[in-house]
Image: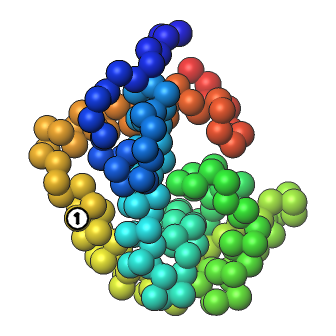
Amino acid sequence: MPTTKPSTRVRNSAIQTEIRQSKPFRSVAQEAAIALLRTASVVTRAVARVVEPSGLSLAQYNALRIIRGAGTGGIPTLSIRERMIDEGTTITRLLDKLEDAGLIRRERSYPDRRQVMCFATDAGRKLLDTLDPQVNAMDEEVVSSLSDAQLEVFVELLDTVRSANAERGAPRTAVRK
């Protein structure tokens, strides 16, 4: 495991200035972790502002997209939870709200009545048809300051960090190698 040396930066970094931290970070690793968390928060807020006027939270939008993507065969509730961007999402309450809004429907499967299948309604698909272009535009906008080459490296770096920390997050279905 790599060791992290204490930070020896003389100047204030952008994240240090942004969060108004007067003391230097304990290490560059701490600075990177805080910058990552702050960046995720800023990007999440930007995308949420596009979705929220429709009455959906970002998690509800994510779940509705997953359900729509499953097609006419539907998708089991637990499969939705496994595919959510935010691993901490409480899926039952989230689906209750989508169902109450008429955006999805749930049915018990046969013969295993323990499994609940979720389907997007016409209203849910119509709402997504309206929101998707706006969210797609925001996806582009939030990373528009990076070149295509920088985006490739950025995605690879994020993949590396996420993969190295996957065990520390919410439990997921085991992926067999």
Q: Position of residue 56 (x, y in %)?
A: 54, 81
Residue in the image at 76% along x and 68% along y: 92
- Residue under label 1: 141
Q: Position of residue 53 (x, y in %)?
A: 45, 88
Name the amino acid, label 1: Glu
Q: Nearer the viewer, residue 37 or 92?
A: 37
Is residue 138 at all visible to an observer of this figure? Answer: yes
**Is residue 91 toward the left or the right of residue 44 in the image?**
right
Q: How is the image coloured?
A: rainbow
The image quarter in which residue 31 lies? top left
Reply above or below: 170 against 73: above
Residue in the image at 36% along x and 85% along y: 130
Secondary structure, mark 1, is helix
The image quarter in which residue 107 lies? bottom right
Is residue 111 at all visible to an observer of this figure? Answer: no
**Is residue 67 toward the left or the right of residue 17 in the image?**
right
Q: Nearer the viewer, residue 119 or 144?
A: 144
Packing grade of label 1 (10 A; few <14, some 14-19, many >=20) is some
**Is residue 127 toward the left or the right of residue 154 in the image?**
right
Q: Position of residue 85 (x, y in %)?
A: 53, 54
Q: How many marks?
A: 1
Residue in the image at 49% along x and 27% along y: 26
Q: Nearer the viewer, residue 86 or 91?
A: 86
**Is residue 98 toward the left or the right of residue 112 in the image?**
left
Reply above or below: 73 against 149: below
The image quarter in which residue 110 lies? bottom right
Residue in the image at 69% along x and 72% along y: 94
Q: Nearer the viewer, residue 164 or 10?
A: 10
Image quadrant in which the C terminus is located: top right
Q: Position of residue 59 (x, y in %)?
A: 57, 67
